Amino acid sequence: MSAGAAAALPNADQAEYWNSESGRRWIACQEALDQRFAPLTELLIDRARVDCGACVVDVGCGTGATTLELAGVVGAYGSVLAVDISEPLLAVARRRVMQGGHANVRFVRGDAQTHRFERASYDLAVSRFGVMFFDDPVGAFRNLARALRPGGRLAFVCWAALEDNPWFAVPLEVGVERLGPPEPRPRRAPGPLALSEQDYVDEILSAAGLADVRIEQVSTWLPGAASTREEAELASQVGLLARLLRERGADAAMRELLIGELADRLAPYLTADGMRLPARLNLVTAAAPR
């Protein structure tokens, strides 16, 4: 396939990003990221009301943290279809599920926007930070709605506004001071903050044919590293600062300088129990028409 043809495929940029060095960086930071997001996974599983015996799709399963939780809840009489666009991330997820002894999980490398799910076959579609990367969000959620049984449910968690999430905002602020702003991107372009606006999320899901859309903004905190330095090093590997460093081709000296400055800036969030970073999220539920 030519480069031009590949670029024309849906979500081609995201497929390239998550199957490249960026995906491998995510894998290298897996344990730290699972720690940060553990409270959010718990919130999502609780809000999704996962039933024992349910058939569930895990959208954008990544390295499998949510998949493992779902597999345990649905039990031997239920099943989980874990879908992700990244083969490196899926390889980690497969290994973790196998080590956990779960026989009720099936993995598919695919794009949830276009994957041919079995129609009306699933009770629930769940995603922790896996639905913000579609270049056609209405088409993607319409595709997921078709996979759900009549009355089947969708539940996902995504980031709210940048300024309400220091885990993103503070590292980016430090990077911009030294390197200038990121390359301009279209508003609501695929990325971690693409679904931060509640009205926009409601508009997308309603246009996709989903009903009973409910969006709750939740304030919580992310448990972080034992030191500001360790937290700053993580931010240099994944997130908005990491992307800016790659865009600017920053060398090791600049990276080290920014890590030091960011560690200082993160000091207000350090507690006796380690880093505690405030977070604000959109917790979203909807249902397929009956």
Image (cartoon, grey):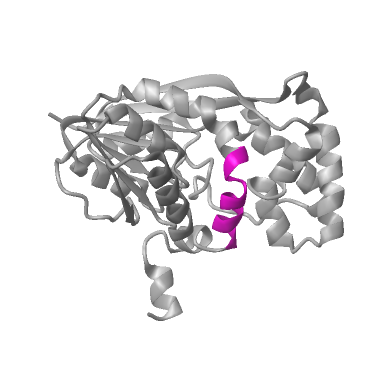
Vertical placement of residue 182 versus 172, above or below: below
Residue at the bottom extreme of this rendering: 2
235 with respect to 111 (left or right): right
Q: Say if residue 60 shows up in the picture.
A: no
Residue 184 appears at what percent x and percent y? 62, 54
Looking at the image, which is closer to me, 70 or 160? Answer: 70
Q: Main secondary structure of the magenta part?
A: helix
Q: Say if residue 267 shows up in the picture.
A: yes
Q: Residue at x 28, y 34 (%)?
A: 206
Residue 22 appears at what percent x and percent y? 58, 57
Q: Is residue 214 magenta?
A: no
Vertical placement of residue 118 versus 129, above or below: below
Q: Residue at x 48, y 62 (%)?
A: 13
| Image quadrant containing the N terminus | bottom left
| Image quadrant containing the C terminus | top left
Quarter of the image where one finds residue 267: top right
Question: Total number of numbered labels?
Answer: 0
Looking at the image, which is closer to me, 73 or 6? Answer: 73
Q: Residue at x 48, y 50 (%)?
A: 190
Residue 26 appears at what percent x and percent y? 58, 50
228 with respect to 156 (left or right): right
Residue 10 appears at what percent x and percent y? 37, 61
Looking at the image, which is closer to me, 188 or 31? Answer: 31
163 with respect to 130 (left or right): right
Q: Which region of the structure is painted magenta?
A: 21-32
Q: Is residue 25 magenta?
A: yes
